[in-house]
Image (cartoon, rainbow, N blue to C red):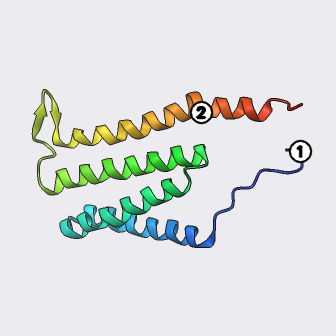
Amino acid sequence: MSANKEEQYIIPAHYRKMENMHIVFWLMKDISWCMIWTWLGIAMIIPTLSIAIIIAWRTRHIKAELSHNLAIAFWISANSLWMISEFFHFDTMVVYGELTGKHLALIPFVLGALTLLYYYAFQRRKEIREHHTPTL
Protein backbone atom coordinates (compact mmCIF):
# COMPACT_ATOMS: atom_id res chain seq x y z
CA MET A 1 0.00 0.00 0.00
CA SER A 2 1.45 3.40 -0.93
CA ALA A 3 2.15 6.11 1.63
CA ASN A 4 -0.73 8.18 0.24
CA LYS A 5 -3.35 5.48 0.67
CA GLU A 6 -4.18 4.43 4.20
CA GLU A 7 -5.87 1.06 4.66
CA GLN A 8 -9.57 1.47 5.48
CA TYR A 9 -11.70 -0.53 7.91
CA ILE A 10 -15.34 -0.02 7.01
CA ILE A 11 -18.20 -1.17 9.23
CA PRO A 12 -21.67 -1.65 7.72
CA ALA A 13 -24.26 0.71 9.28
CA HIS A 14 -26.31 -2.11 10.81
CA TYR A 15 -23.16 -3.44 12.53
CA ARG A 16 -22.45 0.04 13.92
CA LYS A 17 -26.04 0.28 15.23
CA MET A 18 -25.59 -3.05 16.99
CA GLU A 19 -22.32 -1.86 18.54
CA ASN A 20 -24.05 1.30 19.75
CA MET A 21 -26.86 -0.74 21.34
CA HIS A 22 -24.18 -2.88 22.95
CA ILE A 23 -22.92 0.21 24.76
CA VAL A 24 -26.46 1.02 25.96
CA PHE A 25 -26.90 -2.50 27.37
CA TRP A 26 -23.44 -2.42 28.96
CA LEU A 27 -24.19 0.90 30.66
CA MET A 28 -27.56 -0.38 31.88
CA LYS A 29 -25.84 -3.45 33.31
CA ASP A 30 -23.27 -1.37 35.17
CA ILE A 31 -25.79 1.24 36.34
CA SER A 32 -27.92 -1.63 37.68
CA TRP A 33 -24.86 -2.98 39.48
CA CYS A 34 -24.14 0.42 40.99
CA MET A 35 -27.76 0.89 42.06
CA ILE A 36 -28.05 -2.74 43.27
CA TRP A 37 -30.92 -3.47 40.87
CA THR A 38 -30.13 -7.18 40.97
CA TRP A 39 -32.51 -8.63 38.40
CA LEU A 40 -32.10 -5.84 35.84
CA GLY A 41 -28.32 -6.12 36.13
CA ILE A 42 -28.45 -9.88 35.64
CA ALA A 43 -30.91 -9.53 32.75
CA MET A 44 -28.58 -7.04 31.01
CA ILE A 45 -25.78 -9.63 30.96
CA ILE A 46 -27.60 -11.56 28.23
CA PRO A 47 -27.81 -8.83 25.55
CA THR A 48 -24.46 -7.28 26.53
CA LEU A 49 -22.50 -10.52 26.33
CA SER A 50 -24.47 -11.85 23.34
CA ILE A 51 -23.73 -8.77 21.26
CA ALA A 52 -20.05 -8.87 22.28
CA ILE A 53 -19.86 -12.46 21.03
CA ILE A 54 -21.69 -11.59 17.80
CA ILE A 55 -19.31 -8.68 17.19
CA ALA A 56 -16.31 -10.97 17.77
CA TRP A 57 -17.77 -13.54 15.36
CA ARG A 58 -18.41 -10.93 12.67
CA THR A 59 -14.84 -9.65 12.88
CA ARG A 60 -13.20 -13.09 13.00
CA HIS A 61 -11.49 -12.57 9.63
CA ILE A 62 -9.54 -9.54 10.96
CA LYS A 63 -7.19 -10.88 13.64
CA ALA A 64 -6.70 -7.53 15.41
CA GLU A 65 -10.44 -6.93 15.67
CA LEU A 66 -11.15 -10.50 16.72
CA SER A 67 -8.52 -10.38 19.48
CA HIS A 68 -9.81 -7.12 20.91
CA ASN A 69 -13.45 -8.15 20.62
CA LEU A 70 -12.74 -11.46 22.36
CA ALA A 71 -10.97 -9.54 25.12
CA ILE A 72 -14.08 -7.37 25.48
CA ALA A 73 -16.30 -10.47 25.71
CA PHE A 74 -14.00 -11.87 28.43
CA TRP A 75 -14.06 -8.50 30.19
CA ILE A 76 -17.87 -8.43 30.18
CA SER A 77 -17.90 -12.02 31.48
CA ALA A 78 -15.51 -11.13 34.30
CA ASN A 79 -17.40 -7.96 35.11
CA SER A 80 -20.69 -9.88 35.16
CA LEU A 81 -19.30 -12.58 37.43
CA TRP A 82 -17.99 -9.95 39.81
CA MET A 83 -21.40 -8.21 39.79
CA ILE A 84 -23.22 -11.49 40.50
CA SER A 85 -20.81 -12.30 43.34
CA GLU A 86 -21.71 -8.97 44.96
CA PHE A 87 -25.45 -9.31 44.32
CA PHE A 88 -25.57 -12.75 45.94
CA HIS A 89 -23.02 -11.93 48.66
CA PHE A 90 -20.39 -14.51 47.84
CA ASP A 91 -17.86 -11.85 46.82
CA THR A 92 -16.14 -12.05 50.23
CA MET A 93 -16.66 -15.78 50.77
CA VAL A 94 -13.36 -17.67 50.76
CA VAL A 95 -13.15 -20.07 47.82
CA TYR A 96 -9.58 -21.27 48.22
CA GLY A 97 -6.76 -19.96 50.41
CA GLU A 98 -7.12 -16.20 50.30
CA LEU A 99 -9.17 -16.17 47.10
CA THR A 100 -12.76 -15.02 47.44
CA GLY A 101 -15.82 -15.28 45.22
CA LYS A 102 -14.95 -11.94 43.64
CA HIS A 103 -11.58 -13.35 42.61
CA LEU A 104 -13.34 -15.89 40.36
CA ALA A 105 -13.68 -12.97 37.95
CA LEU A 106 -9.90 -13.15 37.49
CA ILE A 107 -10.37 -16.21 35.27
CA PRO A 108 -12.09 -14.38 32.38
CA PHE A 109 -10.03 -11.21 33.06
CA VAL A 110 -6.82 -13.23 32.61
CA LEU A 111 -8.21 -15.01 29.53
CA GLY A 112 -8.87 -11.61 27.96
CA ALA A 113 -5.39 -10.39 28.84
CA LEU A 114 -3.84 -13.59 27.43
CA THR A 115 -5.83 -13.14 24.22
CA LEU A 116 -4.33 -9.67 23.75
CA LEU A 117 -0.88 -10.82 24.85
CA TYR A 118 -0.94 -13.54 22.18
CA TYR A 119 -2.11 -11.07 19.55
CA TYR A 120 0.58 -8.47 20.30
CA ALA A 121 3.40 -10.95 20.98
CA PHE A 122 2.82 -13.21 17.98
CA GLN A 123 0.00 -12.35 15.55
CA ARG A 124 0.72 -8.61 15.27
CA ARG A 125 4.41 -9.23 14.67
CA LYS A 126 3.52 -11.74 11.95
CA GLU A 127 1.18 -9.18 10.34
CA ILE A 128 3.88 -6.51 10.41
CA ARG A 129 6.45 -8.89 8.85
CA GLU A 130 4.01 -9.92 6.11
CA HIS A 131 2.98 -6.32 5.44
CA HIS A 132 6.56 -5.06 5.14
CA THR A 133 7.92 -7.99 3.16
CA PRO A 134 8.47 -6.88 -0.42
CA THR A 135 6.65 -8.95 -3.00
CA LEU A 136 8.36 -9.97 -6.23
**Relative to 136, 6 lies left or right:** left
Distance from disc 2 to disc 1, alpha carbons, whole Å, reads 23 Å
Q: Nearer the viewer, residue 129 or 109?
A: 129
Label 2, residues with CA under 10 Å away: few <14, some 14-19, many ≥20: some
Residue 24 spot, x, y in % from top left: 42, 70
The residue type indicated by label 1 comes to Ser
Residue reaching furthest front?
A: 136
What residue do we see at 20% from left, 55% from top? Answer: 84
86 sits left or right of 49 in the view: left
- Using the image, determine if residue 121 lies above or below residue 26: above
Instruction: Name the element at disc 1.
Output: loop
| Mark 2: amino acid | Gln
- Residue at position x 33%, y 61% from top? 30
Label 1 neighbour load within 10 Å: few <14, some 14-19, many 20+: few
Is residue 64 or residue 113 the one in the foreground?
Answer: 64
Q: Which mark is residue 2?
A: 1
Mark 2 and mark 1 residues within 8 Å of each other at the beta carbon: no
The label shown at residue 123 is: 2
Tell me where residue 1 sits by quadrant: top right
Measured as percent of width and height from the top left, residue 3 is found at 88, 44
Residue 126 placement: quadrant:
top right
* Residue closer to the observer: 127 or 117: 127
Labelled disc at residue 72? none
